[in-house]
Image (spheres, rainbow, N blue to C red):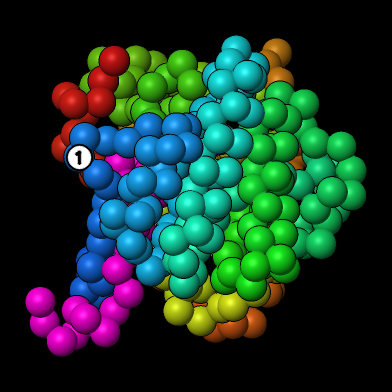
Amino acid sequence: MTAHHRSKPKVFVPGSTGMVGSAIVRRLRRDDYPVETGPVPRVDLCEQASVRRLFREMKPRWVFLAAAKVGGIKANSTYPADFIYRNLAIQTNVLHAAYESGVEKLLFLGSSCIYPKFADQPIKEEYLLTGPLEPTNEPYAVAKIAGIVMAQSYNRQYGTNFLSVMPTNLYGPNDNFDLEDSHVVPALLRKTHEAKTSGKEFVEVWGSGEVRREFLHVDDLADACVFLMENYDSGDIINIGTGIDIAIRDLAMTIKDVVGFTGDIRFNTDMPDGTPRKLLDVSRLTALGWRPSMSFRQGLEATYRWYVENEHRIRK
């Protein structure tokens, strides 16, 4: 083990196989952090005794809690009990074990869906708990809010250093490209690619195309998470995003261009639009000196390349 290695804290990333966890691991390895991605055989993070044993044996100094049960609107409305149970169990077990085993610092990944459905735009951190949530993913959002309050409570009572970050909509390698329950970027990339390869005349997009969303490449999120672990010590939640949003119509047109699809994009206005706008206020993060490094176009091109290279593996 090099002296350089010894000076860096040993890091554990529960959830290292997912889109976010794998991006955090890539980013940490780039800076030579010693990373423990997970035990063999894999521990069920919902089982408290196994999680406590794992932390006792592993003794990590830093933890990035990226493990969570996630999904789109359909999955959230079909399995609400799974979403609240699994997320509450994972974060309760990991946060408590981190406290018990003397972890120096932990980063808890929340989600922008914790904010009220009709929050003013752009959404500031202090809007948390000021209004009703979006009903379709309320069980997931409530679990994430409980995680934030739990982290803050441990800081207050035990003097731990647990931070909570709220990322905007993410996309990138290892995303879920399953058309049944994926989010808008991977779904549109796949639909447009399949329309191109099968010679279809058009791609259908749900809704009017007028609603606006903010997107962040997962490698930029990972960079922000490592930056915050190195530079931020507060239980106050912090938004991670670009501070720039885009209409779904423009997103669809950019994807059409990136993929090289020559047909039409048609908007099915019989389908719901969802919240008109979701944009995070990222001034707290930019004041600390962090900004994303990838333009949306670059991010989409990189994600499309990854999809094409891995299509055989991820197609259902």
Which residue is at 81% across, 43% downward? 116
Q: Amino acid at mark 1?
A: Val
For this view, does 283 lie left or right of residue 200?
right
For this view, does 138 lie left or right of residue 144?
right
Which residue is at 25% across, 26% downward? 314
Q: Residues within 10 Å of mark 1 (few under 14, many from 20)?
A: few
For this view, does 315 lie left or right of residue 176?
left
Q: Residue furthest right?
A: 131
Could you tell me which secondary element the residue under label 1 belongs to?
A: loop
Residue 292 appears anywhere in the view: no
242 is within the stretch colored magenta? no
State which quarter of the image contains the C terminus: top left
Residue 309 appears anywhere in the view: yes
State which quarter of the image contains the N terminus: bottom left
Which residue is at 47% across, 37% downward? 48
For this view, does 254 lie left or right of residue 132?
left
Q: Position of residue 246 (x, y in %)?
A: 61, 49
**Nearer to me, 273 or 192:** 273
Q: Position of residue 47 (x, y in %)?
A: 45, 32
**Nearer to me, 67 or 128:** 67
13 is within the stretch colored magenta? yes
Residue numbers of the magenta segment = 1-25
Q: Position of residue 60 (x, y in %)?
A: 34, 63
Which residue is at 81% across, 62% downward? 126
* Residue at mark 1: 40
**Residue 112 versus residue 292 in the image, above or below:** above
Q: Quadrant of residue 311?
A: top left
**Nearer to me, 257 or 144:** 144
**Residue 24 versus residue 258 in the image, above or below:** below
Q: Position of residue 188 (x, y in %)?
A: 44, 30
Q: Quadrant of residue 255?
A: top left
